[in-house]
Image (tube, helix red, strand yellow):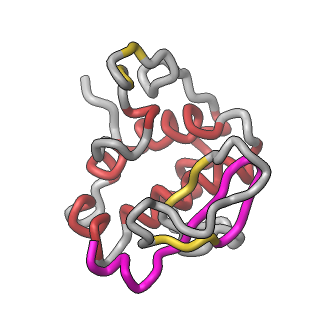
């Protein structure tokens, strides 16, 4: 049986940010829902009118959505986690239209594994650095994003 979008979101929140506290998990949920609700650019086309499933399974976007990475089994994936009430609470919080204010309209995040964040992301320059929350850098869309 296929997971519901709520279940997929809760699993992705746990897998991507389960050890980062409520704000870290809400930040990830905010980025996911920003992509789902994008009105232009790549994510508007991918979400196809608001599909969380399409956003989460877009190739190359969320490592946790893949069982294989670079030819090896990825044990940290959404099929190997068991969300608890906190993950479902945050999924419901995001599905109700809530956003973490610090993240705003960001569409990307990454862990740079260093003390500083790059000024742009992704590599095509369609995002500009917005804030750092914990170990992750968050990026909001530039005007160039419309053309992606």
- Quarter of the image with the C terminus is bottom left
Q: Is residue 40 above or below residue 27?
A: below
Q: Is residue 68 above or below residue 128?
A: above
Indicate the position of residue 60 as horizontal and vertical percent values: 34, 43
Residue situated in front as seen by the camera: 135 or 28: 135
Residue 98: give x, y in percent of width and height.
58, 67
User: Within the magenta stretch, is there residue 147?
Assistant: yes
Which picture quadrant has residue 94? Answer: bottom right
Residue under the image location 45 percent in, 27 percent down: 78
Q: Is residue 13 left or right of residue 42?
A: right
Q: Which residue is depicted at the point 24% across and 59% down? A: 46
- The answer to which quarter of the image holds residue 113 is top right
Residue at the image point whose x is 38% and y is 25% from the top: 69
Write down the region rendered in magenta: 130-148
In this image, 16 relative to 146: left or right?
A: right
Using residue 40 as the reference point, say whether residue 17 is left or right of it.
Answer: right
Q: Position of residue 144 (x, y in %)?
A: 37, 81
The x and y percentages for residue 93 are 59, 56
Q: Determine the image quadrant of residue 145.
A: bottom left
Residue found 75% across the figure and 57% down from its top: 116
The answer to whether residue 59 is above or below residue 32 is above
Residue nearer the viewer, 52 or 69: 69
Q: Quadrant of the N terminus?
A: top left
Residue 104 colored magenta?
A: no
Judged from this view, the residue extending furthest toward the bottom is 143
């Amino acid at each position: 049986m296929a997971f519901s979008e709520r279940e997929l979101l809760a699993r992705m929140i746990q897998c991507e940010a389960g050890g980062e506290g409520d704000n870290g998990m809400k930040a990830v949920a905010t980025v996911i829902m920003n992509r789902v609700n994008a009105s232009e650019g790549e994510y508007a086309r991918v979400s196809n009118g608001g599909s969380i499933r399409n956003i989460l399974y877009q190739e190359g976007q969320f490592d946790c959505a893949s069982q294989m990475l670079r030819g090896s089994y990825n044990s940290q994936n959404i099929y190997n986690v068991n969300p608890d009430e906190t993950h479902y609470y945050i999924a419901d919080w995001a599905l109700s239209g809530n956003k973490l204010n610090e993240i705003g309209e960001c569409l990307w995040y990454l862990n740079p594994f260093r003390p500083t964040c790059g000024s742009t992301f992704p590599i095509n320059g369609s995002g500009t650095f917005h804030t750092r929350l914990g170990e992750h850098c968050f990026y909001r869309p530039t005007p160039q994003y419309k053309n992606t």
